[in-house]
Image (cartoon, coloured by chain):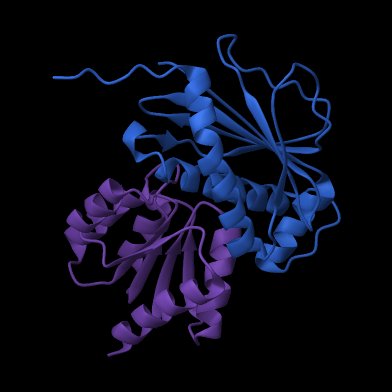
Amino acid sequence: MKVLLVDDSGTMRSIQRRCLNKLGVEDVAEAEDGVQALQLFDAGAFDVVLTDWNMPNMDGLTLLQEIRRRNREIPIVMITTEAERSRVVQAIQFGVSDYLVKPFTPDGLREKLDKWMQVSRQ
Amino acid sequence: MQEAPVITPAALTAEYVNPLISATRDVFEMMLDCTPVRTGLRLKQSGETSDEVTAVIGISGRAKGTIVLGMSSEMACEILRRMVGTIAHSVTDEVCDAVGEVTNMIAGSAKSQLAKYELSISLPNVITGNGLQMHFPSNVSPMIVEFSSDLGPLSIEVGFTEI
């Protein structure tokens, strides 16, 4: 199980990495923006992508489109403050698999990540 | 066809206050396991801030505004500890990142409650050092919302201007 974790905040990457570790996922690559993430994605075989929306250089929505051009199957979960219905609809139209709004509770994050780790393992 | 009502910057600032208060409570409860209590709401007068850590985030869209969070360095360090478990004795880059992310979540959560203005938020900037003068445009009437919490006092300045 290999996860690509994309967020410009080191704090958010830490929280998500710790949650993934508790779920037994140790192979986690981190990127600070969409550009870095795409370089890592092209170089490695990932099972799940977790991405923020608002980031410098390349935002999460553009990253989502770029990854979907390359791979239509991989689960991509957006973890973001963008909670308006229009934004969620936009992300769905571009092929996001699931969506978690910040702020989240520890249980909310764990449930969401656990769901996609299980889907990916099947 | 009815024209959309004109809303003044002062009215918009006031309209943003309640979403800001509920967003602050949600972010603190979910991310920091702490319930902040609103202790004051007033118009901002000019003057220096005594806060040691200040986070600024811009809002744009069908309205343009700024949100400024102010807190002590001890509170900023405690925010990092509660979010990721890292202990910091001074305001490091990690502390600033955690404060910036909290600010981002508060601004983002508040804006989602005002979807009709189609707002976007900027990436947060965090400034350290007290004695700062935060200047809003002259036609803006910024408000200050004050909170107390287990982590210490928190102030949030908000002001909107027409575009």
Q: Quadrant of the C terminus of chain A?
A: bottom left
Give the colour chain B carries in the figure.
blue
Question: Relative to B26, does residue B106 appear above or below in the rendering?
Answer: above
The reply to whether residue B152 is visible in this rendering is yes
Residue B107 lies, with reference to residue A32, above or below; the image says: above
Depth order, front residue of A11/B9: B9
Residue B33, how many percent across, how many down? 67, 66
- Chain A shade in the render: purple
Q: Residue at x 39, y 34 (%)?
A: B119
Q: Residue furthest left?
A: B1
Reply above or below: B140 against A74. above
Percent from the top left, x then y, of residue B84?
Answer: 67, 66
Residue A78 percent coordinates (x, y):
36, 60
- Residue at (76% x, 54% y) in the render: B149
Residue B75: x and y, percent? Answer: 79, 51
Quadrant location of the N terminus of chain A? bottom left
Q: Is residue B96 left or right of residue A110?
A: right
